Amino acid sequence: DSLIKSLRRILLRKDASVEIQRVILSFANSTLTKQNIELKQWKALEAKLLTLSKNKVAAGSLNLFNYLVWTKAHTSNIKFAEAWKSIR
């Protein structure tokens, strides 16, 4: 319970540092009950993350887990490691 309360409090902040997490949680919430997520949904998420990654404040959160690589793996139908190598 305290983790959920803490996460909600963090995401109520209006600064760019939590925007990527907000987009990821929104995506997760909208696809939670679906067995198969459509490619267009992955591509839309990838486009949002690519735009956000250009903002240095927001891009800092990609240091913990690179959601952009994760979406690229899904949109390109490749393994995470291959997607990781492709951005280097």
Image (cartoon, grey):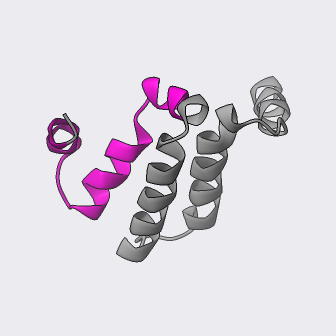
Quadrant in the picture for residue 61 = top right
Residue at image x 57%, y 55%? 28
Residue at image x 52%, y 26%? 60
Tell me the chief SS of the magenta region.
helix
Quadrant in the picture for residue 20 = top right
Q: Quadrant of the N terminus?
A: top right
Could you say where residue 30 lies in the image, as x and y percent from the top left?
62, 65
| Above or below, 49 relative to 2 | below
Q: Quadrant of the C terminus?
A: top left
Could you say where residue 23 lies in the image, as x and y percent from the top left?
61, 51
Image check: 82 left or right of 43?
left
Identify which residue, 52 or 3, lies in the foreground: 52
Identify which residue, 85 or 32, lies in the foreground: 85
Does the magenta run of residues contain 85?
Answer: yes
Number of callouts in the render? Answer: 0
| Above or below, 79 relative to 33 | above
Could you say where residue 32 lies in the image, as x and y percent from the top left?
57, 61
Residue at image x 29%, y 63%? 75
| Above or below, 77 relative to 62 | below
Please state the extent of the stretch shown in magenta in the rendering: 59-86
Residue at image x 46%, y 70%? 41
Image check: 71 left or right of 52?
left
Quadrant in the picture for residue 69 = top left
Could you say where residue 81 lies in the image, as x and y percent from the top left?
18, 37
Identify which residue, 84 or 1, lies in the foreground: 84
Does the magenta run of residues contain 64?
Answer: yes
